[in-house]
Image: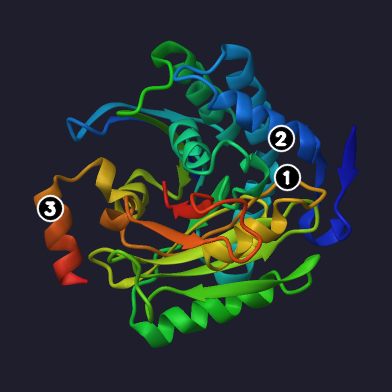
Amino acid sequence: MAHFLLIYDRKAGKLLRQQEFETDVAALDARFAAETEYGVQENIEIVAISAASEEELMKSHGRYFLTSEQLGRRLAAA
Amino acid sequence: MGFVATNPTRYNLTVPRPLSNSALERLGRRLVATDRPEQSDVEGLHVLLSAYSPVLASAVDAVARDIGVVSASRIKNTGTILEKLRRNGGHTLSSIQDLAGLRVVVDGGRAEQDRVVERLTATFLSAARAPRIVDRRARPVQGYRAVHVIVYPDAFRSRSRFERAGSTSGLSGLSAWPTSTGEASAMASRRSRGATPPSKLCVGCSGWQIRSQIQRSRGPRRRSASSRFSCSIR
């Protein structure tokens, strides 16, 4: 199991930070710390997600990694 | 103070209950009283969210054990929680059902998706309350297609949601918060006054539809016309 912190700029559609942690608790703590660092901003999404692997994370939460065009193609193929 | 799940052999949980419902309501109101919430209130929210972590981990383990799927899981992000509270006038922190959730992506057609939903339901059938299913494949909302399985682990209410995954044409599950499966709508209104914090376990959705939300009236007992429950996969 892999545990990730993702910081995503919703307005820019850009992933600002991706960091992996050993445990879900560590990832969640890092998320809370990042919220203190960034503050609560409408356009900044700070999430801690656990997944089987980075590949699975990209499969389940592709919106953080793919462009809108890529996401559109993914949906069309579904 | 903590409490032990009524079925600890299955869930092996001793989960702290950090806040009463009334305290949750007050915290929710304070969080959205100003544009920038006080740090102490954000930290209070963190305490609440941290309590869901072991519930979510247990749900992920249960799904992996019984269904053979390692799901993606998350605790709802703070920004989305605040957005939801603002839409509801800051009165429904205790009613948000997807504070925790997991997502299962299933490669396969509807038959396979249905099979996974059945197995997920069976996994949580012995919980404090029977799972509930909301199938957004049949009735999409704003393009959102997914199956939500709202489950109620013994210690927390929680909701599980199954959503279709983008290119994989399968189910994805996101959840792990206190108990529930299914549609966002119904859950919110009812559990808001329950004794335990809200949680939800979700499975299945299209990755790119994550921004989609389900918004429904809270029913005849809603406080006002603007009092609506909305569900976001974020």
Looking at the image, which residue is at 67% across and 23% down? B44
Q: Residue A20 in the image: state x and y as whole percent.
A: 42, 30
| Subunit ID for the residue under disc 3 | A
Q: Which residue is tagged 2?
A: B24
Q: Residue furthest bottom?
A: B111
Q: Which residue is tagged 3?
A: A70
| C-alpha distance separating marks 2 and 1 | 8 Å
Where is B108 relative to B15, above or below? below
Q: Which picture quadrant has residue B122?
A: bottom right
Where is B40 relative to B167, above or below? above
| Subunit ID for the residue under disc 2 | B
| Amino acid type shown at disc 3 | Gln
| Amino acid type shown at disc 1 | Pro
Please indicate whether residue A37 sits to the left or right of residue B56 in the image. left
Q: Which residue is tagged 1?
A: B197
Mark 2 near mark 1, Cβ–Cβ under 8 Å?
yes
